[in-house]
Each structure stands twice: as C-alpha cells, then as structure tokens.
Image (cartoon, rainbow, N blue to C red):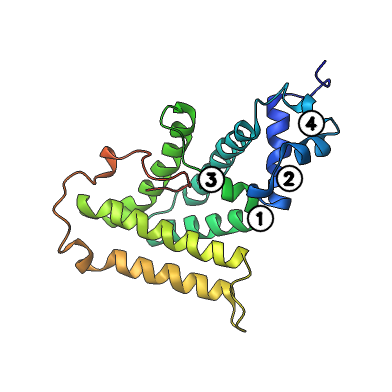
C-alpha cells in the first residue's frame, strides 16, 4: 500500500526541495525516497519515473518563478519594471538553484501543461518589455537579450564565478541598467531583421524551458 499522506504533489514538493540542496541533475529516485522515508520501489506508486519527477518539479518551478516575477513587476512600467523583474529573478534563482535549473527544461512537443506554464512566463516578460514601445521585429531580440543576461549572471553567481573584490549586486545592476539604456536607444529599432514573424503575439513556447523564455 502507498504510504498514507504521500501523493504525487508531496513527492514533487520534496523532490524540488531536495534539488535545491543537491542539484537538479543529481536528483535520484533513491534520494527522494530517502527524504520521504520510504523505500525506492514505493515511490513509483506516486511518480512513474525519475523523468516524471523532474517534469513535475520543472512545472512547479516555472509556476513559482512566474508568480514571483509577476508580483515584482505589477504596477511598474518601463525601466522600473525591468529592474524589479531582474532583481526578483536573481533572488529566486539564487535561493532555489535546483528549481531554477529545472526551469531550463524544455517541454515535450505534446506536453500541453508544460507549454502552458512556460507561455505564462513568456507573457510576463513581454509585459515588462511593453513599456519600451519596441518595433515588432525587435521584441524577440529584446526578450532574448534580457533573458540571456539575467540567466548568465545568475548561473555564474550560483557557481561562485565572481572572485574579484567588487560588489556583485552593483555589477548586476550595472548590467541591467546597460540593457535598459540599450532598450531606450533609438538605434534599437533601426536595421531590424526583415522577418515579420517575431512579434510576441506570434510566439509562444518554442525554444527552451526557462521562465522567462523567448
């Protein structure tokens, strides 16, 4: 019989917490079972496989991050929205490294639930960028640039990649302010690529799994 009180949701929650401790790629069914106080075979009564557990963690993590980002940016516009979004993203990624790694996971082509939660993260990102009145052909470029900058910085910081005696938060704000200056520059809308299919209304979840993907 399955352990009383143990459900797929509780297994995923425990797996997410464990992933923050040991790393998403280091998560195993054995470790999850040990954390929950059951034998490994018993865990398969609640989740079908390690991949199913990781999928569940990824979906939960995307929902959590999207909620955090949306709350941070609500009521803000333009540069203030980007700064609030970026600060909330970094704080969450540093506080939940395993869950954050799970958000990188791209949904399967037939996984509608994963696509839906990923698209919600995209919507938050586009809403944050809406205040800059970018040309349609630059929206995806701007979203990719912001996402890549935030993700790259957070990944380096999580891996202890900054060793110089310089305030890391100050450097992060310099990065974000530099991106904002680029978004505000008139040149951003010039020499745009000829493709007319880059408007956010035509894009949903296609490339990767990270909230916020582009």
Label drawn at residue 18: 2
- Mark 4 and 3 residues: CB-CB less than 8 Å, in contact? no
The relative height of residue 138 versus residue 43 in the rendered view (above or below) is below
Please rate how many residues cluster around mark 3, counting C-alpha atoms within 10 Å: few if below 14, some from 14 to 19, many from 20: many
x, y percentage for residue 60? 59, 37
Dot in front, 1 or 3: 3
Along the polypeptide, which appears first: circle 2 or circle 4? Answer: 2
Q: Could you tell me which secondary element the residue under label 2 belongs to? A: helix
- Mark 2 and 4 residues: CB-CB less than 8 Å, in contact? no
Residue placed under numbered mark 1 in the picture:
95
Q: Could you tell me which secondary element the residue under label 1 belongs to? A: helix
Nearer the observer, 64 or 75: 64
Dot in front, 1 or 2: 2
Q: CA distance from mark 1 to mark 3?
A: 14 Å
Quarter residue 201 falls in: top left
x, y percentage for residue 26? 68, 49
Label drawn at residue 40: 4
């Amino acid at each position: 019989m399955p352990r009383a009180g143990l459900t797929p949701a509780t297994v995923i929650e425990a797996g997410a917490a464990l992933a923050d401790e040991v790393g998403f790629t280091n998560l195993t069914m054995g470790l999850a079972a040990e954390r929950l106080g059951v034998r490994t075979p018993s865990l398969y009564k609640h989740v079908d496989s390690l991949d199913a557990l990781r999928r569940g963690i990824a979906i939960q993590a995307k929902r959590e991050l999207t909620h955090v980002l949306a709350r941070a940016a609500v009521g803000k516009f333009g540069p203030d929205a980007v700064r609030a979004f970026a600060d909330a993203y970094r704080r969450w990624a540093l506080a939940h490294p395993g869950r954050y790694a799970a958000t990188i996971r791209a949904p399967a082509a037939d996984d509608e639930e994963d696509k839906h939660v990923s698209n919600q993260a995209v919507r938050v990102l586009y809403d944050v960028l809406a205040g800059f009145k970018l040309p349609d052909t630059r929206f995806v470029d701007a979203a990719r640039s912001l996402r890549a900058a935030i993700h790259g910085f957070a990944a380096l910081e999580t891996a202890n990649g900054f060793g110089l005696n310089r305030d890391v938060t100050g450097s992060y704000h310099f990065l974000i302010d530099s991106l904002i200056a680029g978004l505000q520059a008139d040149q951003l809308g010039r020499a745009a690529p000829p493709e007319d299919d880059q408007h956010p209304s035509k894009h949903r979840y296609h490339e990767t799994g990270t909230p916020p993907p582009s």
